Image (cartoon, rainbow, N blue to C red):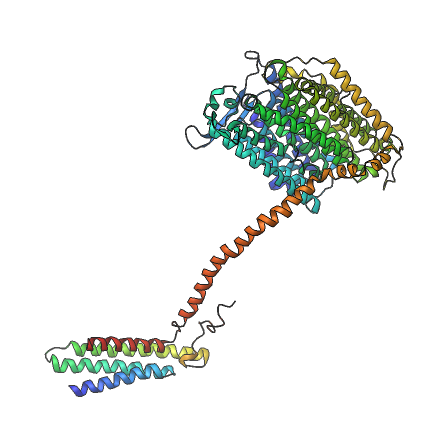
């Protein structure tokens, strides 16, 4: 299956082509080059997936295939870094997800970004992102993953800051880059620690389930936790940064400053699930070496999902609502991974998490693209400026409704199946956590339908110009994604992806399924009551709990807390003294030496007057002195 | 022989004095000629009185006279060119290639 290499070469070459000579091309040509190249790789990814999943199983497991591998850096015999491609169920699944969503976004952007300045640059960056994301998911070793991890971060930075004339966009891109970079420091430390003790970067070796590779870690502990726990916890911090887990989530809502299709591709469907993918990739290691870290991941995910869901309920910017919803859903995936075990029925959480990743990528991309169509029509992100749009934008309305139903977990849409599996896994782990997550799922349904009703129902706001349905290039991806969302739930996902590789048959747990649907329906009902037509209950609630509403609206002041810590404490008490030391002590010493030399040189310079007569005179005096010395001594 | 040496010493120091104190380049040149001539006299005197049978001193003198003539020609050519350029042949004014002043320099 060497042709999989083409999947990476195409976007990279497209990036180089568009990046180097894109400015000379007409925008439409550049857009078409990007889209065509992406269609080719999407096709290739589908062929890969078909071929991979139709190949015979070995011992009931899909074999891990490494079609391409070459040595890149060889430090010693045991320490070397390869570049290559690893195909296993989750990476093939990610290939399909990434190429599909990316293709949809490429097509959509032809309409959405039409007439924007820097259209070619936009497509170049999209190709760069697609290339690096694909490289990330197929990485056969953790180091290659890290390289592409950073590349993904860079392309995210470039795309968030695409409108570089807007100060908020620049600030958001910097924030995203710095926060994720900060988390990546943890990732790097984790990699170093892990590979130092296991002597390998290779995923195959690390996840082989062979406990002998961590034999050297036995006995060495730090602050009461074993080395493996530390390494895996640090790696999770990297994943938490990219996946916007609390408290490293602060960059994601601001990242919505980028163009909306970018938000759909990077900040909803693909890049932000990289953290989930990372944990899933190292999952056997977590289970064997550090189950307590896994529990920590579960609670982090649970808290994040609740936090984000509460905040999403009160935001008024539609993209912010979707951003917090993304954070919340990634929290779901993390919880599912965290509560999962390895074998048999315990592996449900893993499968559910991957399944949710898949379905979420589709419906969240759909939601973002719908939001993009709405913003395109209205020219504003605020939901107060919307209302009654269903008459104007029937396609967008229907597809948005499908996505809302999917994310709320209403059968037969895809979100129902994956979310239900997650809830079943969580209930099996701990009923309390299960009830907690069900509550979060209800909140999800509530805020999604709040969004839906505020946009499409209610009294039409005063529009600057009459909204119109988006052009064909934009509605076609919406329809395709909506179709996928309708049917994706029926994919026998457990047959393809499961924790131990053996086929896992999904059985719907009827009690959980029915109760979660009922809860979701109640939440939707409340949202309908509150927001479908004019109703004063939300106002009354706000007035009843003004402080809660205010703090939720301000995202519980996490950003302010960060600013306080960095600006007030770090800058004042750490950076300032260091800066003072640098300017006065280090620079001062060097300046002092230079100054002294200069002074001295002025003094000496007088000797070299350039007057021959003066030289001759001194020469004469010297000669006389020597003569006198010779004569009298 | 002492008379010759006394004269040459006087000429030599007169030349040195002139070389150091004169401000005019022509005068400096003349002073150099004085120094060279005093050396020539020395050569001849030593040859004549100490090594009467040999000729090295005379030949050195002839060489020195020849070379000093060349040197004078070149020096006068240089002086004429300088005069053409800056209308002045005072030694202290020839500071075109130097920084203006020690104190002003280095403060930029």
Residue B70 is left or right of residue A343, and the answer is left
Hey, which quadrant is residue A628 in on the image?
bottom left
- Residue A593 is situated, as x and y percent measured from the top left of the image, at 45, 60
Q: Residue furthest top?
A: A59
Q: Give the position of the N terminus of chain A as an image quadrant.
A: top right
- Residue A70 is situated, as x and y percent measured from the top left of the image, at 48, 28
- Residue A560 is situated, as x and y percent measured from the top left of the image, at 69, 43
Most foreground residue, A556 or A441: A556
Hey, which quadrant is residue A103 in on the image?
top right
In this picture, is A484 found above or below A148?
above
**Residue A81 seen in this snapshot:** no
Hey, which quadrant is residue A407 in on the image?
top right
- Residue A617 is situated, as x and y percent measured from the top left of the image, at 32, 78
Q: Residue furthest front?
A: A224
State the residue at coordinates (54%, 12%).
A58
Most foreground residue, A265 or A595: A595
In this picture, is A576 found above or below B36?
above
Marks counted in the figure total: 0
**Residue A537 seen in this snapshot:** yes
Q: Give the position of the C terminus of chain A as an image quadrant.
A: bottom left
Residue A343 is left or right of residue A538, and the answer is left
């Amino acid at each position: 299956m060497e042709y999989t290499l083409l999947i990476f070469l195409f976007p990279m070459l497209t990036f180089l082509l568009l990046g180097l000579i894109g400015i000379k091309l007409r925008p439409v040509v550049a857009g078409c080059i990007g889209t065509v190249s992406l269609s080719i790789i999407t096709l290739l990814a589908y062929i890969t997936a078909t071929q991979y999943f139709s190949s015979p199983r070995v011992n009931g497991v899909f074999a891990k295939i490494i079609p391409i591998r070459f040595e890149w850096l060889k430090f010693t015999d045991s320490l070397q870094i390869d570049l290559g491609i690893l195909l296993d169920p989750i990476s093939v699944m990610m290939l399909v997800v990434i190429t599909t969503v990316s293709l949809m976004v490429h097509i959509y952007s032809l309409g959405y970004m039409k007439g924007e300045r820097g259209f070619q640059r936009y497509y170049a960056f999209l190709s760069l992102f697609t290339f690096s994301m694909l490289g990330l998911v197929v990485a056969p070793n953790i180091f290659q993953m890290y390289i592409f991890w950073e590349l993904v971060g860079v392309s995210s930075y470039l795309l968030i800051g695409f409108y570089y004339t807007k100060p908020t966009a620049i600030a958001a891109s910097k924030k995203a880059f710095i926060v994720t970079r900060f988390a990546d420091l943890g990732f790097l430390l984790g990699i170093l620690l892990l590979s130092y003790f296991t002597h390998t970067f290779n995923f195959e070796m690390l996840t082989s389930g062979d406990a002998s590779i961590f034999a050297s870690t036995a006995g060495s502990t730090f602050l009461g936790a074993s080395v493996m726990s530390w390494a895996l916890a640090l790696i999770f911090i990297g994943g938490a940064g990219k996946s916007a887990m609390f408290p490293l989530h602060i960059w994601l809502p601001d990242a919505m400053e980028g163009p909306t299709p970018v938000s759909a591709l990077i900040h909803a469907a693909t890049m932000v699930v990289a953290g989930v993918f990372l944990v899933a990739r190292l999952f056997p290691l977590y289970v064997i070496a550090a189950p307590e870290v896994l529990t920590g991941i579960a609670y982090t995910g649970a808290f994040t999902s609740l936090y984000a869901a509460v905040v999403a309920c009160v935001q008024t910017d539609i993209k912010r609502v979707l951003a917090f919803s993304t954070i919340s859903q990634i929290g779901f995936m993390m919880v599912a991974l965290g509560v999962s075990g390895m074998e048999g029925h315990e592996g449900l959480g893993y499968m559910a998490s991957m399944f949710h990743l898949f379905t979420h990528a589709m419906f969240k991309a759909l939601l973002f693209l719908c939001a993009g169509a709405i913003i395109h029509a209205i020219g504003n992100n605020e939901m107060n400026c919307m209302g009654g749009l269903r008459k104007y934008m029937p396609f967008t309305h229907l597809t948005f409704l499908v996505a809302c139903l999917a994310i709320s977990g209403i059968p037969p849409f895809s979100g129902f199946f994956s979310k239900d599996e997650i809830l079943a896994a969580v209930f099996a782990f701990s009923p309390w956590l299960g009830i907690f997550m069900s509550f979060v799922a209800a909140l999800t349904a509530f805020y999604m339908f709040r969004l839906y009703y505020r946009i499409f129902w209610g009294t039409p706001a005063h529009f600057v110009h009459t909204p119109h349905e988006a052009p064909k290039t934009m509605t076609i991806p919406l329809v395709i994604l909506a179709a996928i969302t309708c049917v994706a739930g029926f994919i026998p996902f457990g047959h393809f992806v499961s924790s131990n590789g053996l086929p896992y048959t999904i059985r719907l747990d009827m009690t959980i399924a029915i109760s979660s649907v009922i809860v979701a329906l109640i939440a939707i009902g409340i949202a309908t009551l509150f927001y479908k037509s004019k109703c004063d209950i939300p106002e009354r609630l706000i007035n009843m709990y003004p402080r809660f509403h205010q703090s939720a609206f301000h995202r519980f002041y996490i950003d302010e807390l960060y600013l306080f810590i960095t600006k007030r404490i770090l800058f004042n008490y750490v950076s300032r003294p260091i800066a003072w030391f640098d300017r006065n002590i280090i620079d001062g010493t060097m300046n002092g030496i230079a100054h002294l030399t200069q002074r001295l040189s002025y003094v000496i310079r007088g000797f070299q007057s350039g007057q021959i007569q003066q030289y001759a005179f001194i020469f004469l005096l010297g000669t006389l002195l020597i003569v006198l010395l010779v004569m009298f001594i | 022989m002492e008379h010759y040496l006394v004269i040459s010493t006087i000429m030599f120091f007169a030349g040195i004095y002139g070389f150091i104190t004169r401000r005019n380049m022509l005068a400096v040149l003349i002073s150099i000629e004085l120094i060279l001539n005093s050396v020539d006299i020395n050569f001849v005197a030593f040859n004549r009185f100490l090594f009467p049978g040999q000729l090295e001193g005379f030949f050195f003198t002839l060489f020195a006279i020849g070379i000093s003539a060349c040197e004078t020609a070149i020096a006068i050519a240089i002086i004429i060119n300088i005069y053409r350029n800056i209308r002045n042949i005072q030694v202290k004014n020839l500071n075109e290639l130097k920084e203006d002043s020690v104190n002003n320099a280095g403060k930029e």
